[in-house]
Amino acid sequence: MDKYEIIIFWSNEDDSFVADVPELAGCMAHGDSYESSLANARDAVDHWIETAKEFGDHIPEARGQRLAYA
C-alpha cells in the first residue's frame, strides 16, 4: 500500500473512530477502536485504488507526509 495520510478521530455522532484519507476523495472508514478504524481505512484505500484503476480514473500520488497523527 502506498503511504497515504490517514487521519483518525473520534466521532460522537457516529459513536466510533473515523479514519479519513484526504488525498483520496471520499475515502473514509470507521471502527470501534483506533486500530480497527486504521485497518478498515487501509482496506478502503485498496478498494478505492482498485476502483479508480477499473474506471481509468486518476490516482493521486501519495505525498507521504504525516504518517502518524494523534
Image (tube, grey):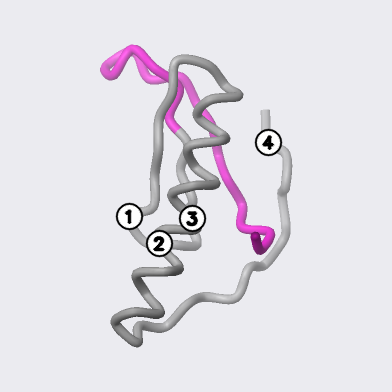
Amino acid on which disc 2 is placed: Trp
Of helix, strand and loop, which one carries label 2? helix
Q: How many marks?
A: 4
Residue 66 x/y as whole percent: 71, 49
Residue 53 x/y as whole percent: 40, 79
Residue 44 x/y as whole percent: 43, 49
Single out the residue that lies furthest toward the bottom: 56
Residue 48's tag is 2
- Mark 2 Cα-neighbour bin, 10 Å: few <14, some 14–19, many ≥20: some
Amino acid on which disc 3 is placed: Val
Of helix, strand and loop, which one carries label 1? loop
Q: Which residue is mark 4?
A: 69
Which residue is painted at 45% across and 68% down in the image? 49
Residue 59 x/y as whole percent: 47, 77
Q: Which residue is mark 1?
A: 26
| Distance CA(mark 4)–CA(mark 1) | 19 Å
| Distance CA(mark 1)–CA(mark 2) | 9 Å
Between circles 1 and 2, the one closer to the viewer is 2
Amino acid on which disc 4 is placed: Tyr
Residue 34 colored magenta? no
Which residue is painted at 49% across and 47% down in the image? 43
Amino acid on which disc 1 is placed: Gly
Sequence-wise first label, 4 or 2: 2
Q: Which residue is mark 3?
A: 45
| Distance CA(mark 3)–CA(mark 1) | 10 Å
Q: Quadrant of the N terminus?
A: bottom right
Sequence-wise first label, 3 or 4: 3
In this view, the residue in front, 12 or 17, is: 17
